[in-house]
Image: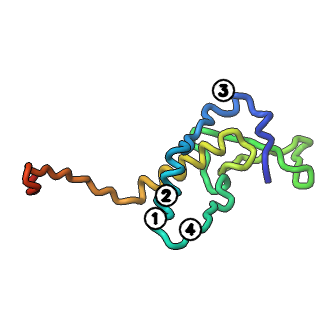
């Protein structure tokens, strides 16, 4: 299922759609590190990535169902409230990035880096 995001109006149907991308240099560094650290370099893909990301709590997206699935009550067509992003929404890329960012930052254990100073003879100390 997809939605017609080209009909969305900025400021009315969505506020933010920006999601960062990796730079060319960062991508090259990733490839070099991958080759140096792993004997197997396969492909990875997030299956149905956009549909795995939640919509922000302050954002409501209402959609019309395809003709085959539409329901009418008292002559009025019923709409559906989305709980997840769908392909075609302008903000879906950003929502996926936010999900990925939160997952990698909340579920990881970060260890503080200690910088050791050395004297001119190479002896370490704090």
Q: Nearer the viewer, residue 71 or 19?
A: 19
Distance in Å between CA atoms under marks 1 and 4: 10 Å
- 3D distance between C-alphas at marks 1 and 3: 46 Å
**Mark closer to the chain start, 3 or 2:** 3
In terms of secondary structure, where does tag 2 sit? Answer: helix
Q: Does label 1 or label 3 sit earlier along the sequence?
A: 3
- Residue at the spot of label 3: 11
| Residue at screen point 61% across, 46% down | 55
Callout 4 touching callout 2 (CB < 8 Å):
no
Assess whether mark 3 and mark 4 are in contact (beta carbons under 8 angstroms): no
Seen as rendered, the residue at the extreme bottom is 39
- Mark 4 and mark 2: Cα distance apart in space: 11 Å
Q: Residue at x 54, y 42 (%)?
A: 23
Does residue 65 appear left or right of residue 97 in this picture? right
Whether tag 2 and tag 1 are in contact, CB under 8 A, the answer is: yes
Which residue is label 1 attached to?
A: 36
Q: Nearer the viewer, residue 20 or 116?
A: 116
Q: Residues within 10 Å of mark 1 (few under 14, many from 20)?
A: few
């Amino acid at each position: 299922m997809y939605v017609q995001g080209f009909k969305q109006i900025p400021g009315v149907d969505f506020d933010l759609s920006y999601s960062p991308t990796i730079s060319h240099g960062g991508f090259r560094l990733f490839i070099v590190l991958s080759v140096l650290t792993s004997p197997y370099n396969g492909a990875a893909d997030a299956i149905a990535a956009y549909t795995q990301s939640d919509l922000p709590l302050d954002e409501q997206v209402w959609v019309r169902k395809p003709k085959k699935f539409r329901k009418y009550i008292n002559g009025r067509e019923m709409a559906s409230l989305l709980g997840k992003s769908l392909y075609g929404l302008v903000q879906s890329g950003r929502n996926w990035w936010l999900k990925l960012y939160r997952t990698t930052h909340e579920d990881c254990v970060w260890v503080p880096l200690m910088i050791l100073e050395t004297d001119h003879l190479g002896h370490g100390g704090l």
